[in-house]
């Protein structure tokens, strides 16, 4: 079955299509309006010739996963419905720019980088507590919403979510996951993820470490246009030291160096084991620059 082509003015369920917003890992995203004038983001699945195939099943799992989440740093699902035999997911419409766009425009200050990372971790920690591992954290999936002079983080696109614990039992994750399969974005991929091994919450922590390095240094720890090379670098090559990458900047304190290094450990057994652990290190890093302007 093929998802209907959505055009401005078209009605789908109780929503009227306004226009395209973009594309996520598992489908196209459109701005829609309900009968009360509320604006939302509607996600429709990528064309899947088999309605019971992998793409459709993953899309359904994303919809179910989002309904478990309720946190200010995570995009919220407001509705899930079936139309013409296809599943559609309706989410809050987030007005802002991606972290990747912000980084292209200008460097963020170290203090701002830590504040953004703290919000990302707060949202990720809530998802982990519900049994959800994002598996595709990257600047393109981080929206910065202006909030009176500061940015509120919104994490989007749970299209590659991995379910663990009770959530896995509830939604049948075992049939959709396994070893030897690689999912995610190579530039932000944890070593165990790049090697096709089973992943858990520590893969998200590694991705946050990559983004934190990028925000602080102005570039990611590894750069190569070849995705296979990128995955090999993450799997096998030690990342550069942050203090060397930033030429010993005054703000690059031992606490900040330890924070980034602890998130980027190759072996997940030696990495920060949980979001509360890395948040404790991040808070210590933030205190270490309190005396700086």
Image (spheres, rainbow, N blue to C red):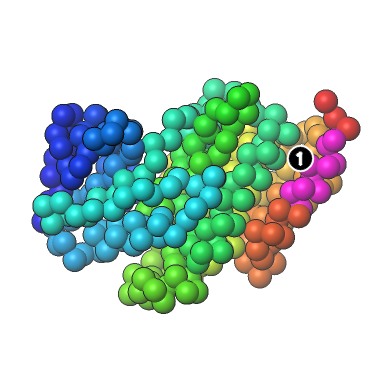
| Whole-percent x, y for residue 39 in the image | 33, 33
Q: State whether residue 159 is above or below residue 199.
A: above
- Say which quadrant the N terminus sits in: bottom left
Magenta range: 281-290
Is 103 located above or below residue 180 in the figure?
A: above
Tell me which residue sits at (60%, 24%) in the image: 148
Residue drawn at (57%, 36%) of the image: 152
Pinpoint residue 3: horizontal percent, then vertical percent: 15, 48
The question of residue 286 being in magenta is answered with yes
Residue occupying the far right of the picture = 291
**Percent from the top left, x then y, of residue 81?**
23, 53
In this view, 288 is above or below 165:
above
Q: Residue furthest front?
A: 36
Residue 285 image-quadrant placement: top right
Query: In the rendered image, which quarter contains the C terminus?
Result: top right
Q: Residues within 10 Å of mark 1 (few under 14, many from 20)?
A: few
| Local secondary structure at mark 1 | helix
- Tell which of 153 and 181 is nearer to you: 153
Residue bearing mark 1: 244
> Which residue is nearer to you in this view: 177 or 118?
118
Location of residue 162 (image quadrant): bottom left
Is 244 on the left-hand or right-hand side of 228? right
- 154 is within the stretch colored magenta: no
């Amino acid at each position: 079955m093929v998802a209907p082509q959505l055009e401005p003015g078209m009605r789908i369920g109780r929503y009227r299509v306004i226009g395209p917003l973009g594309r996520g890992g598992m489908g196209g995203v459109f701005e829609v309006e309900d009968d009360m004038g509320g604006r939302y983001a509607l996600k429709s699945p990528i064309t899947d010739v088999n309605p019971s195939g992998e793409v459709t099943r993953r899309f359904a799992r994303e919809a179910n996963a989002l309904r478990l989440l309720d946190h200010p740093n995570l995009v919220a699902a407001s509705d899930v419905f079936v139309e013409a035999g296809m599943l559609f997911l309706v989410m809050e419409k987030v007005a802002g720019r991606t972290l990747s766009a912000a980084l292209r425009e200008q460097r963020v200050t170290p203090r701002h980088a830590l504040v953004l990372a703290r919000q990302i971790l707060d949202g990720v920690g809530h998802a982990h507590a519900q049994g959800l591992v994002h598996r595709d954290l990257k600047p393109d999936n981080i929206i910065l919403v202006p909030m009176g002079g500061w940015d509120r983080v919104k994490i989007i696109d749970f299209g590659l979510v991995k379910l663990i614990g009770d959530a896995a039992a509830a939604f049948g994750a075992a049939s959709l996951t396994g070893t030897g399969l690689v999912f995610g974005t190579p530039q932000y991929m944890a070593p165990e993820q790049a090697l096709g091994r089973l992943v858990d919450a520590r893969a998200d922590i590694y991705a946050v470490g990559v983004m934190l390095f990028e925000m602080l240094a102005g570039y990611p720890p590894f750069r190569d246009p070849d995705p296979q090379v990128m995955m090999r670098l993450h799997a096998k090559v030690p990342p550069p030291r942050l203090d060397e990458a930033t030429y010993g900047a005054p703000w690059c304190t031992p606490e900040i160096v330890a924070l980034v290094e602890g998130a980027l450990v190759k072996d997940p057994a030696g990495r920060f084991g949980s979001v509360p652990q890395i948040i404790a290190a991040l808070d210590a890093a933030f205190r270490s620059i309190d005396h700086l302007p």
